Amino acid sequence: MSEFLLDARNISIAFGGLKACQNLTLQIPAGGLYGLIGPNGAGKTTAFNLLTGVYTPQSGSIHLDGRPITGLPPHQIAKAGLSRTFQNIRLFGELSVLDNIMLGCHLRGRHALVRTLLRTPAFVAQEAAMRTRAMDLLGMFNLAHLADEQARSLPYGDQRRLEICRALATEPKVLLLDEPAAGMNPSEKKSLAQSIRFIRDCFKLAVLLIEHDMGLVMDICEKITVLDHGCPIAFDVPAKIQCDPRVCEAYLGEPAADQPAPAGGGPAA
């Protein structure tokens, strides 16, 4: 059994002549809180799409908790325990806050056409249990009082938290967060950082975070992978990532002054 809960090795994909992601290795242990950063267009969201089955890697492999998931469709990967949020919020705006969470809960439900149509006692009991779980999740994120509101009517920060809450309703082993702090004010970002730590600790899962807010990333992530033009250029703890000349060059266009040449790359493949 691998020591890594999420073990993606040398995954690559190209669109025509554009190498969107090349030889990316991401290995996250149980309980890990890791970051994936890089300039705009570096391939971060493409990496998430490869991990979650939106795209199929043209090379490389992905294992989740020792199980191969390379090439599986998104719903099967979600059921295996890999869930995500999106850079652009993708809630069901017409549905209530509660119904958005219930949809996540249904991934773990047992469904049968006859039982659903006839609303048998088993169906009613399952729905009640899911509703209770959904309300519990909303309570953890201070959204329970908004359960009957339309999702699209929520303030931006609450919509972000609702999307994370819906992802947790699928009972993931690994949670991928794609720019969760986008559009948030400093107070909301501080609260988000606390929420991400709480999620990792309370739900006993691993977290992989894409984020442009470097203060947030450096504050909460244990290790960070840096992408540039689809290629991994660094993997280390935050303090060393901040000083890595390759990272400075990727973000600023010039190497950091007085920095020694790095001796190594990303994690071992």
Image (cartoon, helix red, strand yellow):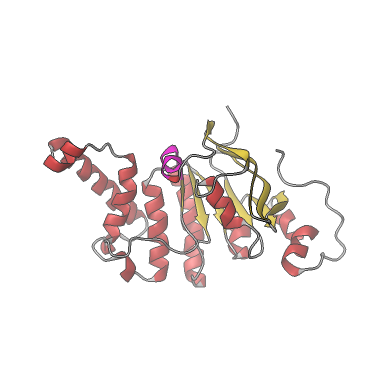
Find out whether residue 170 is within the magenta segment: no
Give x and y (percent) for residue 167. Answer: 41, 51
**Quadrant that contains the C terminus:** top right
For this rendering, which residue is in front, 201 or 178?
Answer: 178
Rendered residue at 49%/71% (across/down):
183
Left/right of residue 4 with respect to residue 240 in the rendered view: left
Rendered residue at 49%/58% (across/down):
194
Give x and y (percent) for residue 135. Answer: 28, 52
For this rendering, which residue is in front, 208 or 115?
Answer: 115
Give x and y (percent) for residue 49. Answer: 53, 51
Give x and y (percent) for residue 122. Answer: 17, 35
Residue found farthest to the top: 1
Left/right of residue 123 with respect to residue 145 in the rendered view: left
Find out whether residue 77 is within the magenta segment: yes
For this rendering, which residue is in front, 156 or 193?
Answer: 156
Classified by dominant secondary structure, the portion drawn in magenta counts as helix
Residue 11 visible here? yes
Which residues fall within the magenta stretch?
75-82
Residue 136 visible here? no
Left/right of residue 113 with respect to residue 268 in the rendered view: left
